[in-house]
Image (cartoon, grey):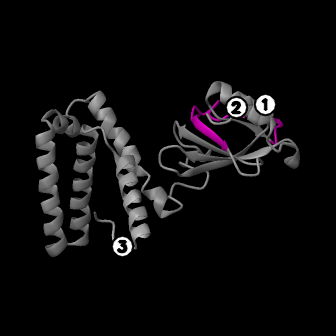
Amino acid sequence: MTLTATEIDALEWEKQHGLLPAIVQHATNGTVLMLAYMNREALHATLERGRAVFYSRSRRQLWEKGETSGNSLRVIDIHRDCDGDALLVTALPAGPVCHLGTATCFGDEPACAVAALGFLPELEQIIDARLADPPEGSYTAQLYAKGMRHVAQKVGEEGVEVALAAVGESDERLLSESADLLFHLLVLLRSRGCGMRELATELRARHADSVNSRRTDLRR
């Protein structure tokens, strides 16, 4: 975690009567999960336990997320903002975050288009789990077991299916075939030790190059 004990002391605790707002963000897909408050003790407890601990303003005591429901937050990292008076907590939830049973305290629906794309890293994790411990009948595991050449062939076949759907079939069919292509591409990338992060890095680098050279596309 980014914050150290020394850095905790340097935060602007007195500005808000000993409390700092803590925005909790899903460490994988970037979704904003909830807003709570931390005092020094809660922040220290979070760092020690590796699970999110907050301060309840109504009960005036510490509370660990999930201590009664089991829906805890495994903390991945904590960052302070530029003024030192707010915290960003990235975490992995074990179940619904909200006490109402929704995925976030702001409901189940993604608040923005980017959050909706957050399922792709989750899909990568699902693929990794299938490859590490193949469940009986898993298509992903069976596909991977046939080797790189077979996976590559499937990507090519799915690419053709996408092209055919684009020129002669419905939008629903195009989306379905595109989902098949993306899934098989993710398996191929994972087979080579790559993933969406590396792919996004490549696209970002191409964009930077296009801006610098005043090109109008992301091809190389």
Q: Position of residue 44 (x, y in %)?
A: 73, 29
Q: Which of the labelled discs sits on residue 126, or is there none? A: none
What stretch of residues is rendered in magenta?
A: 57-79
Along the line of sight, the residue nearer the viewer: 188 or 17: 188
Q: Which of the labelled discs sits on residue 41, or is there none? A: 1
> Of the residues shown, which amino acid type is indicated by label 2?
Thr
Q: Secondary structure at mark 1?
A: helix
Q: Position of residue 102 (x, y in %)?
A: 55, 49
Dividing the image into 4 quarters, which one contains the C terminus?
bottom left
Q: Which residue is mark 2?
A: 4
Near mark 2 (Cα within 10 A), the count class, few <14, some 14-19 or many ≥20, is few
> Of the residues shown, which amino acid type is indicated by label 1?
Glu
Is residue 40 positioned above or below 23 on the image?
above
Residue occupying image coordinates x 56% and y 55%: 107
Near mark 1 (Cα within 10 A), the count class, few <14, some 14-19 or many ≥20, is some
Residue occupying image coordinates x 19% and y 34%: 137
Of circles 1 and 2, which is in front? Answer: 2
